[in-house]
Image (cartoon, rainbow, N blue to C red):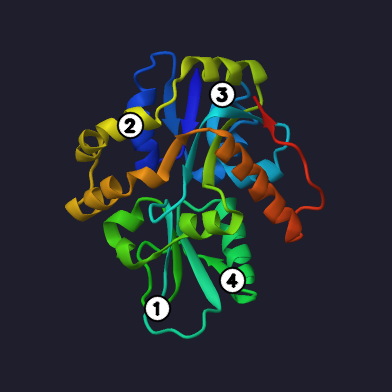
Amino acid sequence: MKLILPKNIFTSILSTELLKNDKLKLSHKESSLITKDLEYNTSAIALIPTLDLINHRNLFVSNKLALAFDGALSNSYFHFVEGEKKIEKIYLRGDVSLNEILLTKILFSERYSANLEIALDPGKSAEKGKDFLVVGDENFTSWDFQNALSLADEASELIEFPYVNYVFASPDREALQKFNESVNAVDSIIEDQIEKIIDNLDLGEEAKSFITQNIGSLYFDMTDNEVNAVNELIKLVFFHGIIDDMFDVKFI
């Protein structure tokens, strides 16, 4: 069973459990390209950015596992220029997906009534004097993540549910059902083993400590909370006029 994942610290943590299942063959791809890949690999299962569902409503979504946050721990952080009084433009860099583009717009509209300009930053290094949303592991290797603003925390506060960053999805209902049957709930297992798992990651001690201390705000099990959270994210983009109609997510 082919499983396509984005490459980041949190999927690496999840993979410690997924790799115990010899039925699963893991591969990695940039977040923005994963859902497109399912058009060609129609029997594959992929961990896709949740808001990709608004453009791919035919996909079936697992009610077993996902990737969600509701606190300081996040795959995306805002890094603002110190002392800045007004934010007009945000540069996005890293493993950017539709989630970050839409939620950045929505968050600044909701919080500050700001019509923010967003630009993708393809540079190898970030230019000083700019405001950034950084997506992925670069946060934990090259940025002051402890003094940054967690996108997950802001989004979860807005919808009053955990922020479901990624969901497992497939065009193939039967394949996804087999995936659901072949995987177990993992939150408690990972939490019990987190220090050992984190020790094996290529991270500095400060990042390892931060992730370990905040592991309670990271969720992989898809519970009613996460199902509701996905529906709330869809409602959010609808209320902001990004989509013209509501739709039912095909959970199985």
Q: What secondary structure is marked by label 1? A: loop
Q: Quadrant of residue 17?
A: top left
The tag earlier along the polypeptide, 4 or 3, is: 3
Q: Mark 4, mark 3: which one is toward the viewer?
A: 4
The residue to which callout 2 is attached is 190
Q: Mark 3, mark 1: which one is toward the viewer?
A: 1
Q: Residues within 10 Å of mark 1 (few under 14, many from 20)?
A: some
Disc 4 versus disc 3: distance between alpha carbons?
Answer: 39 Å
The tag earlier along the polypeptide, 3 or 1, is: 3
Q: Would residue 69 be visible to someone looking at this image?
A: yes
Q: What secondary structure is marked by label 3? A: loop
Residue 111: image tag: 4
- Amino acid tagged 4: Arg
Disc 3 versus disc 1: distance between alpha carbons?
Answer: 42 Å
- Amino acid tagged 1: Val
Q: What secondary structure is marked by label 2? A: helix
Q: Are marks 4 and 3 in contact (CB under 8 Å)?
A: no
Residue appearing at x 29%, y 48% in the figure: 211
Residue appearing at x 55%, y 51% in the figure: 97
Q: Mark 2, mark 1: which one is toward the viewer?
A: 2
The tag earlier along the polypeptide, 3 or 2, is: 3
The tag earlier along the polypeptide, 4 or 1, is: 1
Disc 2 versus disc 1: distance between alpha carbons?
Answer: 36 Å
Q: Are marks 2 and 1 in contact (CB under 8 Å)?
A: no
Q: Is residue 95 above or below residue 20?
A: below
Q: Are marks 2 and 4 in contact (CB under 8 Å)?
A: no
Residue 44: image tag: 3
Q: Is residue 213 above or below residue 39?
A: below
Q: Mark 3, mark 2: which one is toward the viewer?
A: 2
Q: Residues within 10 Å of mark 3 (few under 14, many from 20)?
A: many
The residue to which callout 1 is attached is 81
